[in-house]
Image (cartoon, rainbow, N blue to C red):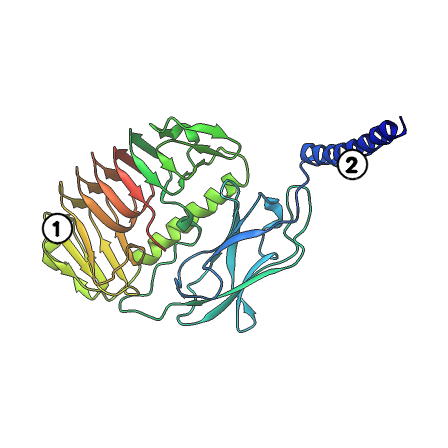
Amino acid sequence: MIKSKSSKIFLAILLVIIIIPMAFIGCDASMSVLGSPEVSSTFPSNVATGANINGTITATFADSVDSTTINDATFTISAGGLDISGIVTYDGPNKKAIFAPSMNLGYSTEYTATLTTGVKNLESTAMTEANVWTFTTADAGIGPTPVNLRTAANYVMLAKNAISTIPNSVITGDVGISPAAETYMTGFSQTDSTGYATSTQVTGFLYAADMVSPTSSNLTTAVEDMLTAYGDAAGRITPDFSNLGAGEIGSLTLSPGLYNWTSSVTVGSNVTISGGANDTWIFQVTGDLSIGSDFDVILSGGAQAKNIVWQVSGTVTLEAGAHFEGIVLSQTAITLNTGASINGRLLAQSRIDLDQATVTNPAM
């Protein structure tokens, strides 16, 4: 009997040892207590080299943070002990803090990025220590000084008045429209959430001016930056090439430089853009730009789409099956017809229309 009673007491104690921790675990789960903010990745990464002088600097968090704590006091970029001027925004759906320098960074220069302990999560818990990393910018290449897109670079497609797609298009990157409302995004069959929308056609998020802050203010800034970038590209003087090919550039090989046409430009056969990884191109087109069906813009020699800017005063049209490379800054509208594709960005001051097209963010 004594042995049986001892066994029962032992079992009771064992059950208490097991059940009490489990109860506390259950409480912790239901309370959903978050730890301090943690940075899961940065761009450029720590000690990276060859960073863009005109790119954004970003930090992605493991969990959402309080957007009001992401600002120019808590996210800074410096070189030689001096802070760099820039615009700081927070991309909630991507959990990303973004620093867009107001001016191009210097070539071959080491920069230090710092996120301070002023950054807090949604429960007002601050970072336990500052997150600091360094990166070095690329060496200068051949060609004009790169155009700084600032916060417009946060979008693969950005327009003021309308964006439409005839399904199914394939878009990689975020899409924004402002000052127009979300109803002017058509064909996406999007699903709304707080401050953004999603679509099966978009690997990324859709943003519109009538969504809650900070989306609306971020878009206002991005459109302003798009207009500034357009003015910068259009305002470059002393071109290396003027009215090349009388506006027909098919079959040509285009070396780094500033190009200017006082007329429309057409691509009636494949055209090659050839240069090194750090080389740059700016194409100024006074009229329209069109690329014919099934013709391609081809990159060679290490040339990168992120370093190619097409500034177009008129409309931009990619006919069926055409492929394009570079950043398109259009003062009016951009159209990609059936099966057309671009590795780059579409930034239009009017509208963007896609017909089963493919739009891909350029490698940064």
* Local SS, label 2: helix
Location of the C terminus by quadrant is bottom left
Which residue appears at 17% of the width and 44% of the height? 290
User: Which percent across, then down, holds residue 105?
Assistant: 43, 66
Q: Say whether residue 36 is visible.
A: yes
Q: Residue furthest bottom?
A: 80
Disc 2 residue type? Ile
Residue drawn at 21 percent across, 51 percent down: 286
Confirm or deny contact between disc 1 and disc 2 (CB under 8 A).
no
Q: Is residue 343 above or below residue 77?
A: above
**Of 227 and 202, the residue lying toward us:** 202
Q: Which mark is residue 171?
A: none
Q: Residues within 10 Å of mark 1 (few under 14, many from 20)?
A: some
Quadrant showing the N terminus: top right
Looking at the image, residue 132 sits to the left or right of residue 283; the answer is right
* Count of labels in the image: 2
- 1 or 2: mark nearer the eye: 2
Q: Which mark is residue 270?
A: 1
**Quarter of the image where one finds residue 7:** top right
Q: Position of residue 40 (x, y in %)?
A: 53, 51
Residue where numbered disc 2 is placed: 17
Name which quarter of the figure residue 76 lies in: bottom right
Residue type, label 1: Asn
Of the pair 94 and 208, the residue shown nearer to us: 94
In the image, is residue 191 above or below residue 336?
above
Q: Is residue 93 left or right of residue 189?
A: right
Q: Nearer the viewer, residue 102 or 42?
A: 42
